[in-house]
Amino acid sequence: MTIRLTINGQIRTYDGDPRDSLLDALRRTYRLTGAKDVCREGFCGACTVHIDGQAVPSCLRPMGLLEGADVTTIEGISSPEGFSPVQAAFVEHDVVQCGMCFPGMVMSMTDFLKRNPSPSRAEVKTAMAGNLCRCTGYEKIVDAVMSVQADERANR
Ligand code: FES
Ligand code: FES
């Protein structure tokens, strides 16, 4: 079974087992290792990507269900001009320690801010519930996310 999908704007085909997870296909077949392989059970959020514009854990998505899907990974979220606003805020606020949670957090928070551009701090924390970080204590990450929407408000 050949599956055709778009990954970071490029049409790709997948000829492996349709039960293979998107996470494995990304990392092993397409060599896109930004989505992290941690729990493989949908708990940690480290493997989060966008499928058809929505943040989802790629470890739970079998390739067989992705015919025609539009996938964006952390590798596809920046532009030739540089980091995406969420990436830039994470760097600016120095949120990264080991970095395992970073790509999934960026993908989740990018989707969240698209749907809720002016969230409260409590809403950011709730939206972050599916992304575990064992290093930072979360407060700096929340600061970074809040700064994105503050900057965007200032630019309106
Ligand atoms: S590796 Fe997918 S949610 Fe943890
Ligand atoms: S920085 Fe280490 S898990 Fe978040």
Image (cartoon, rainbow, N blue to C red):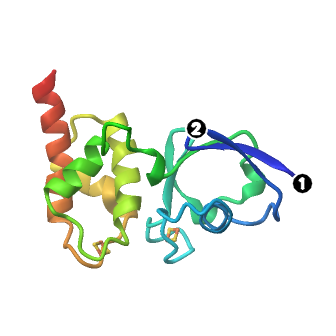
At a point 21% along the width and 35% down the height, the residue shown is 118
Residue under label 1, please give it.
1
Q: Position of residue 24 (x, y in %)?
A: 64, 68
Q: Position of residue 98 (x, y in %)?
A: 29, 77
Query: Mark 2 near ligand 1 (CB under 8 Å)?
Result: no
At a point 29% along the width and 50% down the height, the residue shown is 87
| Amino acid under disc 2 | Gly
Choose between 39 and 75: the one closer to the eye: 75
Q: Position of residue 26 (x, y in %)?
A: 61, 61
Which type of secondary structure does the marked residue at label 2 adopt? Answer: loop
| Amino acid under disc 1 | Met
Farthest-out residue, top: 156
Residue under label 2, please give it.
9
**Quadrant of the frame with the N terminus:** bottom right
> Can residue 120 be seen here?
no
Q: Is residue 152 above or below residue 1?
A: above
Residue 20: name its quadrant: bottom right
Specify whether 55 is left or right of 24: left
Farthest-out residue, left: 154
Specify whether 9 is left or right of 90: right
Choose between 103 and 119: the one closer to the eye: 103
| Mark found first going from the N terminus, 2 or 1 | 1
**Quadrant of the frame with the C terminus:** top left
At a point 20% along the width and 60% down the height, the residue shown is 141
Specify whether 74 is left or right of 23: left
User: Alpha-carbon distance for marks 2 and 1?
Assistant: 22 Å
Q: Position of residue 46 (x, y in %)?
A: 44, 67
Q: Nearer the viewer, mark 2 or mark 1?
A: 2
- The crowd level at tag 1 (other Cα within 10 Å; few <14, some 14-19, many 20+) is few
Which type of secondary structure does the marked residue at label 1 adopt? Answer: loop
